[in-house]
Image (spheres, rainbow, N blue to C red):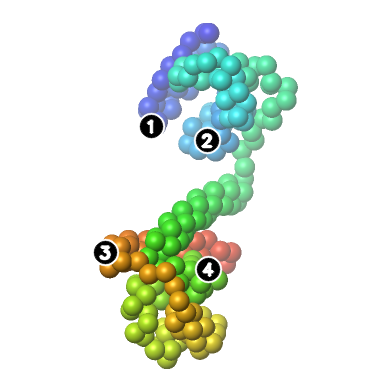
Amino acid sequence: MVGSKRVPHSPAGLAELRAFLLAIAGDPTDIPCFVETNHGLLVSSLLEAGFPVYPVNPKTVDRRRRTSGAETDLIDACLLARTGRSDLADLRRLEPDGPIVQELKGLTRDQDTLIQSQTRLVNQLTACLKAYYPAALELFCKLQQPSALAFLEAYPTPGAALEANIEDIAVLLKRHGHPQPNRTAEHIMRKLREPHLRADAITTRTKARLMLALVSQLSPLLDQIKAYEPGDRPPF
């Protein structure tokens, strides 16, 4: 090993890293950099400075780590460097993307992150409803739609839903963009009147509170995900 260095993830830290590498070899093209990602501020900084960057699949390093039987940042860095040297001929050098491609890739990654958050919240909401309001899971095809979330917010318990009438439900669904509000309102009321498992009063109160908290997080997230669709402009 020629040397090792830990730097902060900051402009000064990245400048320090570039200086450290250039002290080893004056020409940045003589120092291939092996990283476990193909994007980020570190990668951008290395590319801008002229260093060749080679992304390495993290799973490849994981396999070698299991063989070594130890795990520290220094050992991981050594394993990554060793993997890069031995597999250099098979690695693909990362080339900087044009501005449009960079933006498209960034937007796609961020959209995927938001969708993962949506999936996590929907799973939590489903588990919550199963605990006290299982009938609600039979009322809509998808919980992650504005009309379904609006219904849950308006009628957070089975008792509250049964006290509603078909007309009120239809108005609510129409206001939140449901394509068939009247037909769906009739379906909802019919389903609610069927026999269902009922939770006790304490479970209903506590889980209804959690359900409303989850809905309050999910509703704006749907709007943000929709804003990533083609044709929508950012608010800045």
| Of residues 89 and 188, the one drawn nearer to the viewer in this rendering | 188
Tell me the quarter of the image containing the C terminus: bottom left
| Of residues 99 and 110, the one drawn nearer to the viewer in this rendering | 110
Q: Which mark is residue 142?
A: 4
| Of residues 146 and 158, the one drawn nearer to the viewer in this rendering | 158
Question: SS of the residue at dot 3?
Answer: helix
Amino acid residing under circle 2: Ser
Amino acid residing under circle 1: Ser
Horizontal and vertical percent position of residue 155: 35, 76
- Give yes or no for contact between labels 1 and 3 (Cβ–Cβ under 8 Å): no
**Relative height, residue 142 to residue 110 (above, below):** below
- Which is nearer the N-term, disc 1 or disc 3? 1
- Identify the residue position indicated by label 2 in the image: 44
- Give yes or no for contact between labels 1 and 2 (Cβ–Cβ under 8 Å): no
Q: Residue at x 45, y 76 (%)?
A: 195
- Which is nearer the N-term, disc 4 or disc 3? 4
Question: Which marked residue is nearer to the observer: mark 4 or mark 1?
Answer: 4
